[in-house]
Image: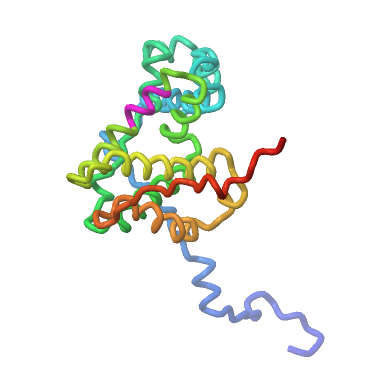
Amino acid sequence: MTSGDVPDAQEQRVTVPEAVVREATARPEPEPVPEARPEAERETKGQRTRRRILEASRRQFAQCGYERATIRSIAADAGVDKASVIHYFGTKQELFREAVAWQIPIAEMTTDDPRESVGNYLRNMLDNWSKDPETPMTALLRASMTSEEAAELLRGRVTAQAVDPVAERLGDDPDARLKSALVGAMMMGVATHRHILRMPDLAEADLADVLRLAVPVLSELITPESTAGPVPEPDPESEPEPEP
């Protein structure tokens, strides 16, 4: 064949690298099929509706308070009709009580070291409020500002689930209940300022720094060896005289 001839198709041979051939002929791997959950773990339509109503009710009770939140507004928030709310919960009062129900795992977080215990209590509270701004406790706390019924419910829950068990661990300490109540009040104050009022210095602080400074102060109250002396009375002579 001369240089001017055009080679026919049989004489043209192209060497293709084996890697390219393998890539072109390889079958794509099938995508993994998600593992089906057991029948017992699947959420039914009724369970989904119920959960959506509970979540919507917490938002409404937290934003509007118990008195102003209505079944109609809760239903609209949840994307259901009023009849569904009544079907699953009956009355607004029954819905409220279930929406703000929670359990404080005091026993699981308590150790023989008061400082470690208080660290667990405070970290657990702040972590929960950080992950979910509409926790049952947050909704109940907000609602208690405008509803005596909600306030009474909050008092009962905190006393039974936090004050009582912590005071019991203090044994014969005559101030056991007061110390336990003070720890709870201070922790609630820290959580409220950080996550509800959003006070800038506390809201923007790292959790590690909040725990580093707050835990030693709080744990001092429930350390068995700690005793508090009387608060000194002010010296009348050192008080400034009233202006005329």
Q: Nearer the viewer, residue 78 or 186?
A: 186
Q: Nearer the viewer, residue 221 or 4?
A: 221
Outermost residue, right side: 4
- Say if residue 218 shows up in the picture: yes
Drawn side of residue 180 relative to residue 75, left or right? left
x and y, in percent, of residue 54 in the image: 43, 25
- Say if residue 33 shows up in the picture: no
Specify start and end residues of the magenta stretch as a single range. Answer: 151-157
- Residue at 66% over, 74% down: 9
x and y, in percent, of residue 37 in the image: 31, 41
Color encoding of the figure:
rainbow
Point out the image quarter for the N terminus. Answer: bottom right
Point out the image quarter for the C terminus. Answer: top right
Residue 55 sits above or below residue 121 on the image? above
Q: Nearer the viewer, residue 77 or 107?
A: 107
Q: Nearer the viewer, residue 216 or 112?
A: 216
